[in-house]
Amino acid sequence: MILIKKMQMKHVDRVYEIEESSFAVPWTKKDFYGEVRRKNAYYLVAVDDATEYVAGYGGLWHIVNEGHINNIAVDENYRRMGIGSLLVEGLIRLATNKKMIGLTLEVRMGNLAAYALYAKHGFKIEGIRKNYYSEPKEDAIIMWKKFNTEDTDETF
């Protein structure tokens, strides 16, 4: 069974491995250590409860009254098992508990799987950022999910 937990320092090495295998321009391990310490950063990990193996992660920054999802990635051996959805749901729950007005993110124009994941969870297209990504150069779709912060679930 996969459990969604708050990311801790002990998870950083594995999160970095997933990051490095998932993105053309990955964040550094030092970046993730900084994120764990950062006051306005919230990261979750998807952990196999039998083995404690980190299968995926997702994170956001709390900026004023909204959240910006930075990264969500799942180990290639665990993809298509619903882990991405569990992470998105966890970030939505976290954001509503923090009384954020909504979540925003950018997704590569050609990343149809990620776009479908976010759309499934109620994210809507709000704009395009031209040439936002490098390696390869590609536009980003800006997506938003706005929600009623009166609905909370104190899980995180």
Image: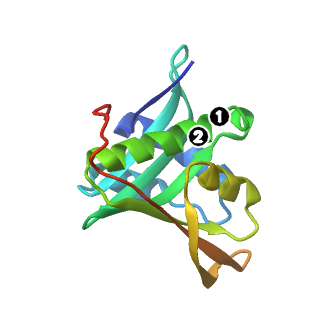
- The answer, for residue 20, to whether it is visible in the render is no
Q: Quadrant of the C terminus?
A: top left
Q: At label 1, which amino acid type do we have?
A: Gly
Identify the image quadrant of residue 34. bottom left
Q: Crowding near pointer 1: few (<14 within 10 Å), some, many (20+)?
A: few
Badge 2 vs badge 1, beta-carbon distance below 8 Å: yes
Q: Say which residue appears at 60% left-offset and 54% top-offset.
A: 118
Location of residue 39 (image quadrant) = bottom left
- Residue 147 on image: x %, y %: 39, 55
Where's residue 42, x and y in %? 35, 49
Residue 56 at what x, y percent from top left?
57, 39
* Residue at image mark 2: 85
Closer to the camera in the image, 115 or 22: 115
Distance of mark 2 from mark 1, alpha carbons? 5 Å
Label 1 secondary element: loop
In which quadrant of the rendered image does the N terminus lie? Answer: top right
40 and 144: which is toward the camera: 144
**Which residue position holds label 1?**
82
The one of 85 and 45 positioned closer to us in this rendering: 85
Q: Which x, y percent locates residue 119? A: 62, 55
Which amino acid type is marked by label 2?
Answer: Ser
